[in-house]
Amino acid sequence: MSTLTDPPKASFRLSQLIYDTRYRSYTIQIVALILIVAAFAWLINNTIENLESLGKDFDFGFLGSAAGYDINQMLIPYDNQMSHGRAALVGILNTLLVAVLGCLAATLIGVIAGVLRLSKNWVVNKLMAVYVEGFRNVPLLLWIILIFAIMTESMPQPREFRGDDATQAMLLDDSVAITNRGIWIPRIGFSNSLSGNEAVAAMDGATPVATGAIDWLVLFGTLAISIVAISFVRKRADRIQQATGVRPVTWYQQLALLVVPFGLVAFFLGLTIVKPFLQGFNFTEGTHLRNSLIALWLALSLYTGAFIAEIVRAGILAISKGQTEAAFALGLQPNRTMNLIILPQAMRVIIPPLISQYLNLTKNSSLAIAVGYMDVRATLGGITINQTGRELEGMLLLGGFYLALSLLISAGMNFYNRSTQLQER
Amino acid sequence: MKNTVFFGALTVAGLAAGMASAATLDDVKARGSLNCGVTTGVPGFAAPDANGVWEGFDVAVCRAVAAAIFGDSTAVQFVPTTGQTRFTALASGEVDMLARNTTWTFSRDVDLKFEFTGVNYYDGQGFMVPRDLGVSSASELDGATVCIQTGTTTELNLADYFRVNNISYEPVPIETNAEAQQQYLAGACDVYTTDASALAATRATFEAPGDHIILPEIISKEPLGPLVRHGDNEWADIVRWTLNALIAAEELGITSANIEGLASAPTDNPEVNRLLGTEGELGAMLGLEANWAMNAIMAGGNYGEVFESNIGESTPIGLARGLNAQWTNGGLIYTPPFR
């Protein structure tokens, strides 16, 4: 005979919340959640109460009121009667400009320095080591200030270019002026602009030119179409090579596709190079690269470039030596081995840390404060906050902008990263 | 991540505002010293001397307030602030008062929630250019590169002036007076613009002051004065009446030389007696000692003495009293009565 005993009745006691491993993790998580929520609630409540006691409200209306201050570097039209929001946008574009220029230059410098640091040539190798160690072990701020100081203190003033007994002369057939207020380079204007802007002569006897966004769009559109056409030509050449083993000669077709449409469009738009010249206190016309932009751009590129060089070197070293030997065994030359075998594989190692370097560079661009570059920190986060007293709103917007920009960059780079990863099945 | 940034900003704002609401006089007394926001260095107005001791026309206001509270003009911690950081420093409670060439404007008084406690210098914005530039008027500055301190009223006046006169300029934004001086002397800007008094003070420190001229145009009204946070009226009263005491002292002929004698016994002039605490309860009304005004005046002398010893015509800065003479001498310096 068998006796049936009831299974022990599951009675729940409070102490189980701590001593029973089935419940303990839930208890800890719930307590932690309550603490976090309470802390946030306290912070928000504290902020609201203190804003009230100061008699301040939380309002973004200031973005619509007139800014009243001028900005020296503007990528879009702006004058001091436009709104604080517009001024913030001018600052945002300036931030984006230096970030994009910086990322491009840093990548270029980094890849070259990283590859050269692996060179068997002792001098090249050591030079690159000095560059990398020199730049990444000295604070970025010092480099920015150093380059800015060199530009302002040791370059000639614009007035030294003036007159018959000028002590300074412009470079490259009177087209580039290096001064202590920045560098003036020629700009491109259009004498038959499509944008409908009136063409104005820069000085007596010069061709009247106008600027227009539409002209640039047409020009770059033509270039893009040419590049697509060139890729078709190359694919066709690939097909013929696959079928017959002989690659047809296409370089002249490619060159013609690149040059002829571009040349025709440029001719019809009346593309003209406008050189800077001295007028009044400063050079005028041309494009003015201000000291602040040059200092910030160069320092950011050189500094971040040093980090990228190490990332590139690590990526290349991560590829087994057997790959190189196999490529050599197949008769590939060293530079083709690098381009076709090593770098494509190294990219998988390089891209993830590269993303964080791009993010660093973008955020470091707020060091513009050291040289008075008018980025978004200087307009929205500086003068606007100071004139309107909206610290909380301004700082939240500024934080939100940098956050959004960083997330966008990582999203873009992650997309690129996925496309270069090994496709596994 | 997004939350972290948001709440981080809230924390800073919350903590900062939390400090601002307490009674300032009690805080200052408990701390034993006054935190006074000054410039990062404008000779004559606020700059450390060779021994690191702050001195100048604005510094004298801080010292007078400290003397009125503690009877000790050295009980001051000077906090250098730039044009951009000054208001945050004051609003957050990092400093108890600002005496920092700050222009009294409507929006600063009303919208930024500050309380201006008077005017210690009536100024106006001017332009300084190198003499060999051959410029004699601000209207000839079309296309010039102008060094300008960001976050100041001068920045807005400059924009207005060039807009009204329909001429163009290139602003070079800089943070501090020292930075502006370096950029201007290197020729990175043609013109330096700020309050005319600060231009004179800056020019006085150049190797060759004669090579630079200050243009005749004064393009704005810049009443400069000390300010405190909105909402603590007792504290504002102390700062306001300390400044007024210095002004009244000059008007009544009380100087650092004769103050000891005047304060030792009641004189024939009741207003002098009230001011120096030998009659009436003015000190107690402010929550201070009876001899508060005497201490404030002894810190650096009366308004006129402070002016003469820091920025007056006998100093390298060499500013005339002009608008800043007593009202009895045709100036604008005027205090309400001590009654």
Image (tube, coloured by chain):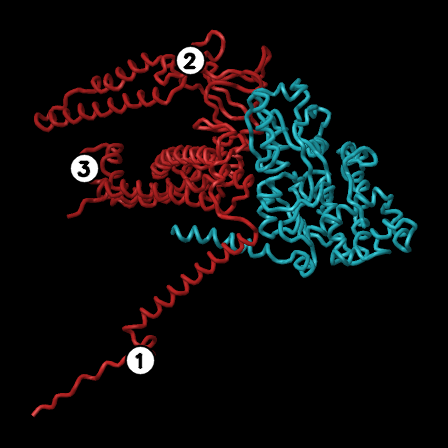
Q: Which residue shows up at 31% across the image and 45% down it?
A: A352
Residue type for callout 3: Ala
The numbered dot on residue A199 is: 2
**Residue A367 visible (yes or no):** no
Q: According to the colouring, which chain is cyan?
A: B
The numbered dot on residue B151 is: none
Q: Answer with mark 2 or mark 3, whichever residue precedes in sequence.
A: 2
Q: Which residue shows up at 31% across the image and 77% down it?
A: A16
Front-most of B322 and A321? B322
Residue type for callout 1: Arg
In the figure, A307 relative to A228: above or below? below
Proximity of marks 2 and 3: CB atoms separated by less than 8 Å: no
Chain letter of mark 2 equals: A
Q: Residue at label 3?
A: A329
Chain letter of mark 1 equals: A
Question: What's the distance in space between the residues labelled 1 and 3, CA to CA?
Answer: 74 Å
The location of residue B165, given as percent across then percent down, is 59, 21
Q: Residue at label 1?
A: A13
In the figure, A156 relative to B233: above or below? above
- From the viewer's perspective, is the residue at label 1 or at label 3 nearer? 1
Q: According to the colouring, which chain is red?
A: A
Secondary structure at badge 3 equals helix
Q: Answer with mark 1 or mark 2, whichever residue precedes in sequence.
A: 1
Confirm whether circles 1 and 3 share one chain. yes
Q: Quadrant of the N terminus of chain A?
A: bottom left
Question: What's the distance in space between the residues labelled 1 and 2, CA to CA?
Answer: 87 Å
